[in-house]
Structure formats: structure tokens, C-alpha cells
Image (cartoon, rainbow, N blue to C red):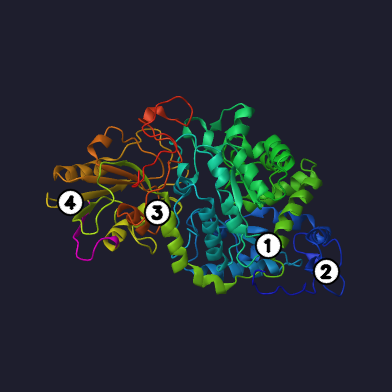
Amino acid sequence: MRSRLLAFGLPAALALVAHGGPVRADPGPGPAPYLDPHLSVQDRVEDLLGRMSLDDKLGQMTQPERRYVTPAEVTRYRIGSVLSSGGSAPDPNTPQSWADMYDGLQRAALAGPLRIPIMYGVDAVHGDNNMVGATIFPHNIGLGATRDPALVRGIGAATAAEMAGTGVDWDFAPCVCVARNDRWGRTYESFGEVPELPSMMTTIIDGLQGDELGGPTSVLATAKHFVGDGGTEGGDDRGDTRLPEKELRAVHLPPFRAAVKRGVGAVMVSYSSWNGLKMHHNRYLITDVLKGELGFTGFVVSDYNGIDEIDGRPGFTKDEVAAAINAGIDMVMVPTEWRRFIDYLRDGVKDGDVPMSRIDGANRRILTKKFELGLFERPMADRSHLKTIGSAPHRKLARRAVAESQVLLKNDDVLPLDEDDKVFVAGRSADDIGMQSGGWTITWQGRPGPITPGTTILDGIREAADPDATVSYSKDGGGIDSSYDVAIAVVGETPYAEYHGDKTGDLGLDDADLKTIGRLRAAGVPVVVVLVSGRPLDIAAELPKWDALVAAWLPGTEGEGVADVLYGDADPRGRLPVTWMRSGDQEPINEGDGKKPLFPFGYGLTYDG
């Protein structure tokens, strides 16, 4: 079982709950039944639920952001969960600081009369990516290219171990969306454009949660974003998925069905709409389909300020709160205005707009996962796992994942390189951890630069080459001459994340990258282009000028994996998880739609033919 510090018994002062009135039952002189780990989870939940006031229950359904809630407020308002939004980290951003922050908030939760622990949630979408020093794995689009569910399960387990050392016990991952338009800024969060790929990769849930919740490094996984987020018109991140129900079920629902079968603990609702109705208001899909038809027994959480957009206007109203809860959302992510949310939900219950059965049902689901995680027995961070953060075994796993994710798209007898080749390396992404890691890395949108420890692609090339071989580097390609055997241009996209990453215009390389490649070509040597991007780019017009093309996706901190393929230490085995457009105006383009792509879904060359 997860090695956390034991929670002690209830405090003596159980008579009154601040802002909540009297508790429903006096536990008597001994420990209350819900504190007895020998009882069944169901019995413990029912005992605890019977002791909770309305305010206790409302607090459990509320999730503020760490910057907007104090430990004292966690105690006072019976807060059930706290989150870090993208880039929201303690200062300094170290594993120790994360553990200290978590333990401080957990102690505050345990100071409440019923001693109900919090869960702490983060978007650990490719490793524990908010924390400096964590192992950063390839984003999902690269993992989809591997077609390797066992590898992905291992990545989930490694991520969970690195999280566990800091106490963080809830991961807002995996994204099991089916990306149907590469203009979407979340395309790289998808394992692929057909439902079979994300469904296959739900093995990451097994890695995150372990064989069962409550294991030594088990964290709660979250399947997101329910449902159809990858199918919006124009790839609009918060747009409308206009599909008949039959197609929604055929394309976008299967990965959630697979996640539920694996026992995923939480499901997050999408910002997007289905045929004009916001998903946060869709009772049919959340309650009837997800909880009923699919048999989901975990809890449903909103997205960040997700209920604000139900009526299309900024902020949230009492009606929106009631609509979201009645639709089947159990916990609401209200980063800043969480006190107002509690007030509105309380009014909704008192006015009869939200039935008490809905409040009890939400609490029953939330508390079940807390008991299953073992938080009542082991609420504090187990710092013995801190040593796993950025550890050699995890980085080795990430390096293998990078190598398996590389897709060789063109090769005119240039690759693999010889160890003694004289190589010239150029490009904005060649020697930049931030560029090769992409969004959701240390900060929400990501940024260029040495943002966290790791090995750049240039570092990997230098390591792979013979010690006596020449490997020169110039970011813009300046200084190359005809004496080199080969030039490698590592180019692609500047980091971005959801919403800001939506692209309505040109999908091609920017001018700086094209000029860099042009300088290399002018030297008259073979040019290998390594494309670091979160989606296919419009490169058809340029491709005839290149001697080789490798889709490296967003590999993360272990750039040696790219070099392993360039030098033939690993054979390129990756296959396209998405269809590669011939031009940007083909979007959306997907397998089987009759459009002629530059490279079809599943395409990829190898060195052995």
C-alpha cells in the first residue's frame, strides 16, 4: 500500500462544523467506522456521508487553484481538492517545495472535524511536466506513432512514481481525444486521428493507477475531454462538434469506453459543444451515456472555469451551477471564484433547483476514490519516491520512447549516418530543451530555452558521433561549407498549448526555418530535416529540396532518442498517427475521407526496407 504517514483519529471537538452547522452523527468515544480500514469502501463512504453537513458536501465538490486558496480556507470550507493550473508551481520549483506545499494543504484538510483529505490535481500530460527536473516524455502524438501500448503503460507508471514523491495524487491525463483537424492546438495531446489508437493507448491509465488504486505510487487518472473535443469545426479548441450521434459514437466515444473498462478514476468534461449544446450542460451524454450506458463509477470533473461558458457569457451564474451539477458533473474546477460557487450551489439546493440526491451522489463518487487511494490512512507525501524524479531509469525509458516515436518520411540514401561523418547541425530546435518539449512543459504554453534539465537533440548527435568526428553547430545555418558530409536542420514549431495553439492560417514552416534550410542547401551537401512539431506541417512544396525528412514530434527532455535513429542505433519504426496533408487547405484530412495526402495514415519508412 502507498507509504504515507498515518492519519490520526478525529479531534475531540466534533460538535460544530464551521460554516456547516452540527455534524449528523456523534462518532462516540472511539474512532468512527469510516476511519476503520478493515471495513469495505462502500461501508466507509456511507458512514462518512451520514456524518457530513451540507457545507461539508459542497466543499468536497469544489476545486480551487492553489494560488487562490489558503490552508485556513481549505480547513474552513472543507475543500475537497486543489489544483495547479499549467505552470502554477511553488517557489522554488523543486520536488521538495512541491512536497512541502502538498503536505501543508493536506494538514489543513485534516484539521477539519471530519478529517477528510484533499486530492491534489495537476496536468501531468507527458511526465510530471510542471516540475523542474522531472522526466519529460514525448507528447501523445509521438506515443501514438510508436503503436506500443506496453511502452505507454510504463510511461504512466514512471509519471506516477515521480508524482508520488511530491504527494500529488491526481493526474488530469490521459487525453483520449481523437484529433480530426490538425489546426487544433491540442492535436499533439491526441494519440491519433482514429479511435483505435487512443483506445489502444489507454494502457497509460494502468500505469498511472497501478493494478488497483492505493498502490505504492498509484495516482488517480483522468480521461479527457468528454466528448468530441477533437472534432470541432475548424479545429476550434472550444468550438462545436457538429456530428450525428452515430458518428460521435463511432469516432469519439470508443476511447472513453476503453478508459472506463480500465477503471479510470475520473473523467473531465470538454469545453466544446456537441451540435450547439455545451458539454458542461449535456446531461444525456454525461449522466445517461457515460455514467449509465458505459457504467462509469468514478467522478466527473469540469474543466478549468468550464461551467462559465454554458450560457456563452463570461463568469458563471446560479443557473449555470445548477445546470452543470444536474448534468452530472461531480466536482467543479473553479480556480478563483470558488466561494461564490459554493454559495450558488448551496442556494440551488435550498431552492430545490439541485436535488440533495445529486449532491450525495457526487460526494459518494468522490469519497469512494479517496478511500480507494488510501488517503485516509496515508494522506501525506511519501518522500522516499523523490529519488525517482528525473532518474536514470526513467530517462532511459523516455529515450526509448523518443526513438520509437520517430517517423522516417523520406530518405534518399542519406540515413542512417555514419559515426565518422562530418556533420553540420542547424535550426532553432537543435539545441533547445524548451523547443523540443513543446507546451505543457514547466509553463502552460511552454517556451524556448533551458527550462528544465535534459539532453538536446544536438547533445544526442554529438554523443552518437565518433569522438573524433566533426559535429559543427550554427543556429541559423551560417558557416557551413561543402566539406561536410551531411547537414541536419532541426526546425519546427514554437511551443504552444490549448486555445493559443489553434491555427487558422498558414500551417507551414516560418521564414527563419526556411532560410536556415536554404543556407544548408546552398552548401551543396545532403540535407536532413528533423521536424519538431505537434502536428503535421504544410511542407509539400519544400520536400523535393530535402534529402531526408524525419517527424520527431515533441520528444521531451531526452534528445538522444532522435540521434539514436539518425545514426541507426535504433531503426525507425514509428508510423504516422495522423494523415499528413498535401496542403493546409485540405484540413481536415483523415484516413478514408477520399482526399489525397502527402503521406497517408500509418506511413513510415525503415532502414531495412
Residue 588, magenta (yes or no) = no
Answer with mark 3 or mark 2, whichever residue precedes in sequence.
2
**Badge 3 or badge 1: first in the primary sequence:** 1
Q: Is residue 447 visible?
A: no
Dot 4 amino acid type? Asp
Q: CA distance from mark 2 to mark 4?
A: 75 Å
Q: Nearer the viewer, mark 3 or mark 1?
A: 3
In terms of sequence position, does the residue under pointer 3 or pointer 4 come before the other? Answer: 3
Q: Position of residue 222 (x, y in %)?
A: 61, 51
Q: Residues within 10 Å of mark 4 (few under 14, many from 20)?
A: some
The amino acid marked with disc number 2 is Ala
Disc on the earlier residue, 1 or 2 = 2
Mark 1 lies on residue: 373
The disc, 2 or 4, on the residue closer to the chain's N-terminal end is 2
Seen in the picture, residue 129 relative to 242 is either above or below; the reply is below
Label 2 element class:
loop
- Measure the alpha-carbon separation of dots 1 and 4: 56 Å
- Amino acid type, mark 3: Ala
Magenta range:
464-475
Disc assigned to residue 32:
2
On residue 516, the disc is none
